[in-house]
Amino acid sequence: MTAPSTNTAKPATGILALLKTAFINALVALVLFSLMVGIRTEAGSSGQLTYWTRFGELASLVAIVFGGSIVIELLRQWIGPTGAEKLVPPALQSGMSLIGRYLTPALLIFTLLVPVIFYDQRYILDLAILVLTYVMLGWGLNVVVGLAGLLDLGYVAFYAVGAYSYGLLATNFGWSFWICLPLAGILAAFWGVLLGFPVLRLRGDYLAIVTLAFGEIIRLVIINWQELTGGPNGVSGIPRPTFFGIPLDNSDEGFAARLGIEYSPTHRIVFLFYLILALALLTNWVTIRLRRLPIGRAWEALREDEVACRALGINTTTTKLTAFATGAMFGGFAGAFFATRQGFISPESFTFQESALVLAIVVLGGMGSQLGVALAALAMIGGFELFRGLETYRMLVFGMAMVLIMIWRPRGLIGHRAPTVFLTKAQAISSDLVKEGHG
Amino acid sequence: MNGDKILTVDRLTMRFGGIVAVQDLSFDAERKKITALIGPNGAGKTTVFNCITGFYKPSAGAIRLAHDDGRVIALERLNDFRIAKQAKVARTFQNIRLFPGMTALENLMVAQHNALMRASGFTLLGLVGAPGYRDAEKRAIDLATDWLRRVNLLDRADDAAGNFAYGDQRRLEIARAMCTEPALLCLDEPAAGLNARESAALSELLLSIRNELGTSILLIEHDMSVVMEISDHIVVMDHGVKIAEGTPREVRDDPKVIAAYLGADEEEAVAVMESGT
Ligand SMILES: Nc1ncnc2c1ncn2[C@@H]1O[C@H](COP(=O)(O)OP(=O)(O)O)[C@@H](O)[C@H]1O
Ligand SMILES: [Mg+2]
């Protein structure tokens, strides 16, 4: 940890400020912990109050806080956004922009080739499908949170609506996946509008809490409406997707038999992979297009300044509703995919944890950035698997990693906004200027 | 005043709980003219603007907007975005409200939202890239470019509005309001924070908006050099009521106006009197 002091322009004041911050933090810790830890009270044998002091523990805790604040402050200075530009040499910077230019096509080509490269590794294929599902969910939620700036903590509700729409329509009426997919999207969008109406006047924290409640309500309705949804038992026997009518199974009319190749269960996995990839890319394509249309610009303007939008004659109500509906529709598509992939759905899959995970992906990715969200989904879902070996410590390591990334990049992995229209040259806009929205 | 009136404010009253911010205020704004609303801080000028532009619902009174085609719109019955959309009243804010994370050009494109929305078939035609929408977007960019040129910001079209200097932000906000192609433009202290050179440029811009485009302007301003130079008619407010109105010359010599400014803020009173010499 000597690097930062050599890199800062005025190490003396830097160190002084550092020590001051650490000292203040330690002082706060001392005040807090002196009662919580320093003095221990207990009811004695005859009911009298006995107490004893634990100054040793208190001292070590305060020391940890002191040391910890120094380390965090150093980390912030070392890799934090303020000094980042100065610390990265120009050669490396141009190299990074080169990487930036080719990253998207390279990632896309790699993704297209995943089933070819990892054909024999079922585990990786399954993981890739999972990652892509979250990429799609992240992109869907990004419309609401990243573009329109509406904090939605109940996104999983639309995922659930999509999944149950397909599950119930397919098991009850025998409708095929390709008919149910748009229906699932439409139904989810419909619920998005229904949710949108009551919460339109709410902002920020209030909006977040109501959307969170909405997510829970949907889950509780699913659990309790037993006749329709099967309650906690869920819906099982959901038909697997077909290759446009041709089942991907071992039968005589199956995909393999028709092509005259040997049947393998991997066919279905590969098909699912390309299906979710296509759905995710559709989400991406539509979002990118919408951003460049008046509706998308109005979403972003809403995030920037709602009052100004109204002064310009923009109907903020319908603008918010379309954002909710669009995001919900993509969530519904993803839900239908989830149902056909699992073959079984139950309320357990649609808890608040899912909403939080998708939101974390959007925030980590850099709100509004499509590439950032994709990278964040890969990092979060992939990283989560990577730490599987650590067992109990997995959550701890994972949480630490998140904290470090947010210190390093408080505005997410991709910290700039691309303009939707330009006269001479499109310049990336620093995220410092871009508002996060306030509800 | 017996000219052609675009805006008629009739006995407007706005109360906030016990506070009466505007009381029984009546005045008119003439078509294709610049009407200034002046008065010391806290006189209720911004509140009047908020009532006209639908951000506040007046406690009492009527606000009528008469369009060129004879349509008369009761503004107090329309709310927020409809006043800008249907009645074609655009405004700027005392504390600038641009979209800081969007480029100057994008800011002006957002201002043309309603026209572009219609052209994009409420998004469906735009999504499939219909040629009609492409043309409309090109026209919108042309209009935005035109306004960027007028406010002298063309070379900064692709910069984020949040990066602009204060004076540039003020001009960009006016350009954005003008991109809605308003019948009445309401400006809340557009010269606040500008230096003398920028104020002069602003006066010129407002005069060109009135003379070349024939847009009626309602202006709140403290900078007396601007007000006295460009206003056709001035309404003076103090403590929520109108204390005087008339031409710049009449207002300048009105003892009530001078007293109001003297009572509120000496510097401003001096500014009023000095601008007369
Ligand atoms: N939303 C509001 N709630 C309560 N009081 C308000 C509100 N808006 C304005 N006022 C009061 O109305 C009076 C006039 O304010 P304002 O119209 O901003 O004055 P001006 O623009 O002339 O400086 C002030 O006393 C202010 O406190
Ligand atoms: Mg004011």
Image (cartoon, rainbow, N blue to C red):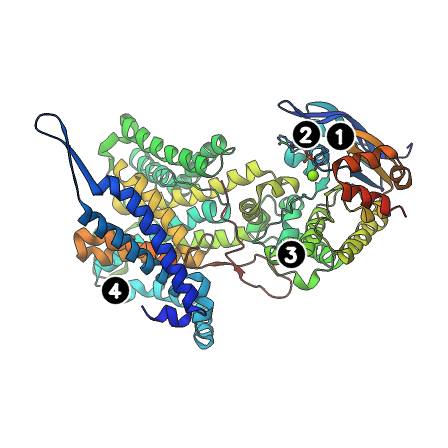
Same chain assignment for discs 1 and 2: yes
Q: For mark 3, what is the residue?
A: B105
Task: Give SS at disc 2.
Answer: loop
Q: For mark 2, what is the residue?
A: B78
Ligand 2 is located in which of the four quadrants? top right
Viewer-nearest of discs 1 and 4: 1
Looking at the image, is B207 positioned above or below residue A322?
below
Q: For mark 1, what is the residue?
A: B73
- Of callouts 1 and 2, the N-terminal one: 1
Same chain assignment for discs 4 and 3: no
Of residues A328 and B247, the one drawn nearer to the viewer in this rendering: B247
Determine the residue positioned at 29% across, 53% down.
A65
Same chain assignment for discs 3 and 1: yes
Residues at marks 1 and 2 touching, judged by CB atoms closer than 8 Å? yes
- Check disc 2: other Cα within 10 Å, few if <14, some if 14-19, many if 20+: some
Residues at marks 3 and 1 touching, judged by CB atoms closer than 8 Å? no
- Check disc 3: other Cα within 10 Å, few if <14, some if 14-19, many if 20+: many
Q: Chain of mark 3?
A: B
Q: For mark 4, what is the residue?
A: A118
Same chain assignment for discs 2 and 3: yes
Same chain assignment for discs 2 and 4: no
State left or right for residue B207 relative to residue A281.
right
Name the amino acid type tagged 4: Phe
